[in-house]
Amino acid sequence: MSEQSNVVCTTEEPTPAELNRARKRLDGLWRRGTEFLGTQYAILGGAMSWVSERNLVSAISNAGGFGVIACGAMEPARLAEEIQATRALTDRPFGVNLITMHPQLNELVQVCLDAGVGHIVLAGGIPPGAAIKAIKDGGAKVIAFSPALVLAKRLVKMGVDALVIEGAEAGGHVGPVSLTVLAQEILPHIQSVPVFVAGGLGRGDALLSYLELGASGGQLGTRFAAAEESIAHEKFKKAFVRAAARDAVTSVQLDDRFPVIPVRALGNEGGRQFVSHQADVIRRFQSGELTRDAAQLEIEHFWAGALRRAVIDGDVEQGSVMAGQSVGMVTSVQPVAQIIEDLVEQAVVALVRQQRRMDADG
């Protein structure tokens, strides 16, 4: 009888009082993140080239999250234009993601500072100390990515204001370690700055588990890439809706002599051709037709423009349909506000159930 009562207790609809208590608890769990970002919710939009532009970024910020412009290969003037256009669509905080290998990194940093951007994300490698100093001297906050504890400690010493730890479940360029392992490795030891988790996040109750481990918030990309406000082609979004988690696979490398940067995307004809292309290039290298450097370039150039072809042109067979494993949780094209509302509600309901279990246990 007691066991049956506990089942009823944990599954019946939450009361208004329970929901209010749970919301306050959630506010407390990610307060460090919300205060750092200046947002209602500590939910960042992952910076995705061709996708994270003014429309999606402003929609995320307007819904209480933190949108992030993907600068990618933009020139300084183009980035200034995008920041201005985003600010015309939202009066809430948003950030800019800069690639550390960009040849005009210093100029791009200055564009952000001149435009009053409060948070700059440095991605794609270890950020130069000079860039970190310039950003901080200019009054903005620095966010950097760390795939390991040793680098996290180094970045904190270099002066970054927050970290994102992104697991291999994420879409696009990924490292070899899952978020579940990274969180256990890093969260207990990095407490001097906020740490946001990323990679494979698709539900609010999952994010909650990382908040309880010490994370300050979470970053999601795949869920937002298929949002109504995303400018991605309808075929791109439909591919997300159709896909299962196992369809998001990392690129294949055939020969250790010719490294391939791991990229997670939906498997398609382009991916199969990439394997054949590598085999052909390796054969030509072994026959003496190509030098090693020339062979490496041919392999690397295969995907040139492939992301744009998928996102903008809708070529989901030959293009690169970058997606994280959370793509299996994209079941429809939703407005950004609904996605964020669902994430928050899932976390709140999970907290209600958690409290009920504790109450039932006495």
Image: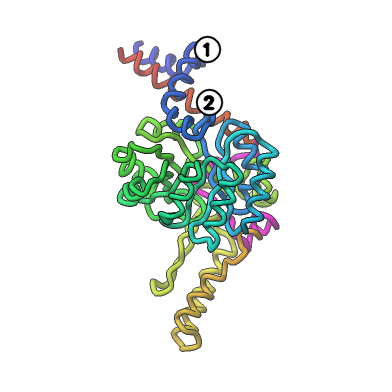
- Residue 1 lies, with reference to residue 159, above or below; the image says above
Q: Residue at the spot x=69%, y=38% of the render? A: 89
Is residue 318 inside the magenta stretch? Answer: yes
Quarter the N terminus occupies? top left
SS type, badge 1 = helix
Q: Residue at the spot x=54%, y=49% of the render? A: 97
How would you rate the neighbour count of disc 2 (Cα within 10 Å): few for under 14, some for 14-19, many for 20 or more? some
Which label is found at residue 30?
none
| Res. 223 in view | no
Q: Residue at the spot x=44%, y=27% of the render? A: 31
Residue 6 placement, left or right of 231: left
Q: Which residue is mark 1?
A: 16
* Dominant SS in magenta: loop
Is residue 233 inside the magenta stretch? Answer: no
Viewer-proximal residue among 268 and 186: 186
Q: Position of residue 102 (x, y in %)?
A: 53, 61
Number of numbered discs: 2
- Pointers 1 and 2 in contact (C-beta within 8 Å): no
Q: Start and end of the magenta stretch?
A: 310-335
- Residue 4 lies, with reference to residue 218, above or below; the image says above
Q: Residue at the spot x=49%, y=11% of the render? A: 17
Q: Looking at the picture, which amino acid does disc 2 mark?
A: Glu
SS type, badge 2 = helix
Q: Position of residue 298 (x, y in %)?
A: 53, 75
Quadrant assignment, res 216: top left
How would you rate the neighbour count of disc 1 (Cα within 10 Å): few for under 14, some for 14-19, many for 20 or more? few
Residue 24 placement, left or right of 335: left
- Residue 278 lies, with reference to residue 30, above or below; the image says below
Viewer-proximal residue among 308 and 282: 308
Disc 1 from disc 2: Cα separation:
13 Å
